[in-house]
Image (cartoon, rainbow, N blue to C red):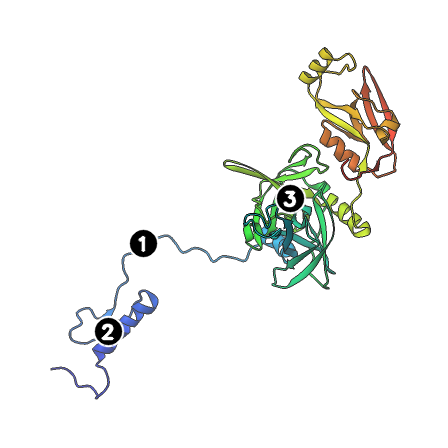
């Protein structure tokens, strides 16, 4: 005979079963105490299931000092997304259903704020073909931006938004960057805002990173960079911008990225802010990388040139009325130094010339035949197409 219970109230057994079911539903398993009642063969606490591990409990995690987190905290708020809309001509527009003659093409890249009153650095190729862009900050604020100027030779551009007291990215000194140091990239790759990737500086002074004719001694890194990272900052472990991410080279199972040194970016940006354009020195020569094999071939087939069988850079052509022509440079001259820098290929010559100034004397050491000499010239302003 069961114990009586008050009308409308569940029996003790039902209350216990209900508690056990609720415990299992909410917590996924727990220990409960059942009343000492007939029909319950095992009274008291229900034992837990078999132990899966007998490892001692881990020590509590102590607050640490993660340098990557700290570096990103310093720069991240100033990294922006840049959205562009370019108007492009459709050559088949209006013909045979080829669509409108003028089409809009959307693009996206990154940038970073360098002045609290709205000055932003990015890549020239990010804003190419447009005068206005949309700039979005990590905190969600959005501004219309005006492109103040862009320099295709170095791939640097300056954008301005009307704002005050914006977060600013601290700028470092790219001349102090060394291979093996940490490299952190921040940007908006593949439309994924505020993405952080980490690697190391794998090389510096890569003048031939993306083809001949460049005027940039690129910083090379293995930090993952993808489309949309362009124009974003490459920073060091102290939270300072050391470069502007600009290009990638990919191969099966590997990839490298290249950044414009921030010292060069600052120089170009200052010229754009002052004049609306960048200024590049020009000396007026066409150059060729020299190898021992090429020197032997030239010496065997030409009576005009006698070249040493070494690696170097040789003058192929001197343009008429150019600074080089006025200084007396000649075809077959082997260029050894520009200013105080030794050069080994045409790109290094261009970088060294670009570090000079228009109208200021520049010394170039050459080897002509068996004799060495130094010529002094004054670079002119590089004009479009030269």
Q: Residue 34 in the image: state x and y as whole percent.
A: 24, 73
Q: Quadrant of residue 143?
A: bottom right
Along the polypeptide, which appears first: circle 2 or circle 1? 2
Q: Is residue 321 left or right of residue 249?
A: right
Give the farthest residue toward the bottom: 7
Question: Which numbered disc, 2 or 1, marks the residue closer to the eye?
Answer: 2
Q: Nearer the viewer, residue 265 or 284?
A: 284
Which residue is the site of mark 3?
A: 246
Kindly state the secondary structure of the residue where label 3 is placed. strand
Say few, some or many: other residues with alpha carbon within 10 Å of mark 3 (under 14 / 14 to 19 / 20 or more).
many
Q: Are marks 2 and 1 in contact (CB under 8 Å)?
A: no
Kindly state the secondary structure of the residue where label 2 is placed. helix
Q: CA distance from mark 1 to mark 3?
A: 51 Å
Number of marks in the image? 3
Residue pictured at 70% horizontal, 36% vertical: 214
Q: Residue 227 in the image: state x and y as whole percent.
A: 58, 46
Which residue is the site of mark 2?
A: 17
Q: Residue 308 in the image: state x and y as whole percent.
A: 74, 16
Say few, some or many: other residues with alpha carbon within 10 Å of mark 2 (under 14 / 14 to 19 / 20 or more).
few
Q: Which mark is residue 52?
A: 1
Q: Is residue 303 visible?
A: yes
Along the polypeptide, which appears first: circle 1 or circle 3? 1
Quadrant position of the N terminus in the picture? bottom left
Residue pictured at 70% horizontal, 37% vertical: 217
Q: CA distance from mark 3 to mark 2?
A: 67 Å
Q: CA distance from mark 2 to mark 1?
A: 27 Å
Residue pictured at 75% horizontal, 28% vertical: 343
Along the polypeptide, which appears first: circle 3 or circle 2? 2
């Amino acid at each position: 005979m069961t114990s009586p219970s008050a009308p409308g109230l569940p029996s003790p057994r039902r209350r216990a079963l209900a508690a056990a079911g609720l415990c299992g539903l909410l917590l996924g398993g727990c220990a409960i105490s059942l009343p000492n009642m007939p029909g319950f063969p095992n009274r008291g606490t229900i034992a837990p299931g078999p132990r899966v591990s007998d490892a001692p409990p881990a020590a509590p995690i102590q607050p640490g000092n993660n340098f990557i987190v700290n570096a990103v905290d310093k720069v991240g708020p100033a990294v922006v997304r840049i959205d562009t809309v370019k108007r492009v001509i459709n050559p088949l527009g209006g013909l045979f259903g080829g669509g409108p003659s003028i089409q809009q093409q959307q693009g996206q890249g990154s940038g970073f704020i360098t002045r609290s009153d709205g000055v932003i650095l990015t890549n020239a190729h990010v804003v190419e073909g447009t005068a206005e862009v949309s700039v979005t900050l990590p905190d969600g604020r959005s501004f219309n931006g005006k492109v103040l100027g862009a320099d295709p030779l170095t791939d640097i551009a300056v954008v301005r938004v009307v704002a005050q007291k914006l977060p600013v990215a601290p700028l470092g000194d790219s001349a102090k960057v060394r291979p093996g140091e940490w490299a952190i990239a921040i940007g908006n790759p593949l439309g994924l805002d505020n993405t952080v990737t980490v690697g190391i500086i794998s090389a510096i002074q890569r003048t031939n990173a993306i083809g001949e004719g460049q005027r940039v001694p690129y910083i090379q890194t293995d930090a993952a960079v993808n489309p949309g990272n362009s124009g974003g900052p490459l920073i060091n472990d102290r939270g300072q911008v050391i470069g502007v991410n600009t290009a990638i080279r990919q191969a099966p199972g590997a990839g490298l990225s290249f950044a414009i040194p921030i010292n060069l970016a600052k120089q170009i940006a200052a010229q754009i802010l002052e004049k609306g354009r960048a200024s590049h020195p020009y000396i007026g020569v066409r150059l060729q990388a020299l190898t021992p094999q090429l020197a032997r071939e030239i010496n065997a087939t030409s009576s005009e040139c006698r070249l040493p069988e070494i690696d170097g850079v040789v003058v192929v052509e001197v343009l008429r009325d150019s600074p080089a022509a006025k200084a007396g440079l000649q075809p077959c001259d082997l260029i050894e130094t520009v200013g105080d820098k030794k050069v080994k290929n045409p790109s290094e010559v261009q970088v060294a010339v670009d570090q000079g100034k228009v109208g200021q004397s520049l010394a170039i050491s050459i080897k002509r035949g068996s004799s060495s000499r130094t010529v002094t010239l004054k670079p002119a302003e590089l004009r479009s197409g030269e």
